[in-house]
Image (cartoon, rainbow, N blue to C red):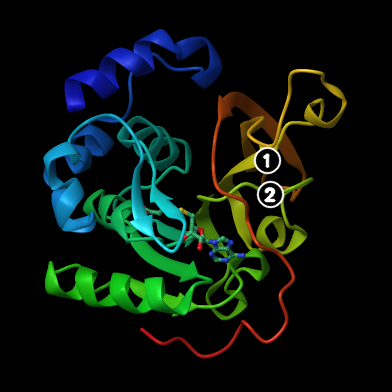
Amino acid sequence: MVEIIAAEVAETSHWLARDHLDPRVMAAMAEVPRHAFVPAHSRGAAYENRPLPIGHGQTISQPYIVAIMTDLSGAGPGRKVLEVGTGCGYQAAVLAATGARVWTIETVPELARQAAFRLAELGYDGIRVRHGDGSKGWPEEAPFDGILVTAAASRRPPAALIEQLAPGGHLVIPVEHRAARFSLFGGAGDQELLVIAKNEDGSVRETCHLPVAFVPLIEGIEGKTGPGDG
Ligand code: SAH
């Protein structure tokens, strides 16, 4: 799996502004047992470079995407990272395996509960899992050195996430492509991955724009935020 990721990173280097990923990220990808995060009937395909269904209409992302998002978020030893969209917990485990301290939020209560249980069982007991609307971030724990959103925002990255980014930090988020609504060929799956870097003076700049496909980020549902279940 890691060789395929390395080859695909080299192929897409013009989008990523790098032709290889941080060796710590590659080591984390090799270390985390992806088969432990997918349903039993998908285990045979766990190390293929493709997304897989995890129930509740959600998917575990393609390993290549998990690797580049981990790298672009700046995850590494001691870094404080927030993930929005816990899903099965795989991305959170990869972040933790780089040495980062991880907080993760999931809007589907059952997925949050299962991910918290699975992560603890696998020994990733430092990861904090909460059920709620991650588009509001995790204000009590802000600021974060990296924020990674694994569901696509419909227009712009939520303001709360940009606010909760530390100076020097990076927000990695898929957004619906601006042109998609006007394109004949564009559809609901037309998205790009943005990297928003916060400068020391608090201003932000935007890079990347890799084409991606994520499930939608559900924003602004009242009554979904609250104390964690996990
Ligand atoms: N990172 C996951 C895959 C995520 S799939 C993994 O490694 O398995 C996207 C997830 O985002 C889904 O589980 C979906 O329920 C969740 N999601 C969508 N909108 C959200 C929101 N506003 N806050 C938190 N989670 C959200």
x, y percent for residue 65: 41, 34
Identify residue for label 2.
Answer: 153
149 displayed left or right of 29: right
User: Which dot marks residue 30?
Assistant: none
Classify 10 Å Cα crowding around label 2: few (below 14), some (14-19), many (20 and above).
Answer: many
Residue 173 in view: yes
Classify 10 Å Cα crowding around label 1: few (below 14), some (14-19), many (20 and above).
Answer: many
Residue 34 in view: no
x, y percent for residue 52: 33, 44
Identify residue for label 1.
Answer: 175
State if disc 2 and disc 1 touch (CB < 8 Å).
yes
- Give the CA separation, mark 1 to mark 2: 5 Å
Q: Residue furthest right?
A: 182
Q: Residue furthest front?
A: 41
Up-down: is 178 above or below 11? below
Image quarter of the C terminus = bottom left
Circle 1: residue type: Val
User: Which is nearer the eye, 14 or 183?
Assistant: 183
Circle 2: residue type: Ala
Q: Which quarter of the picture shows residue 12?
A: top left
Image point 38% across, 47% down: which residue? Answer: 75
User: Which is nearer the eye, 28 or 51?
Assistant: 51
x, y percent for residue 198: 66, 45
The secondary structure type at the circle numbered 1 is strand
Query: Mark 2: is the Cβ under 8 angstroms from ligand 1?
Result: no
Up-down: is 130 above or below 229? above
Image point 43% across, 42% down: which residue? Answer: 74
The mark that comes first in sequence, 1 or 2, is: 2
Image point 23% across, 19% down: which residue? Answer: 4
x, y percent for residue 136: 67, 70
Up-down: is 98 above or below 23? below
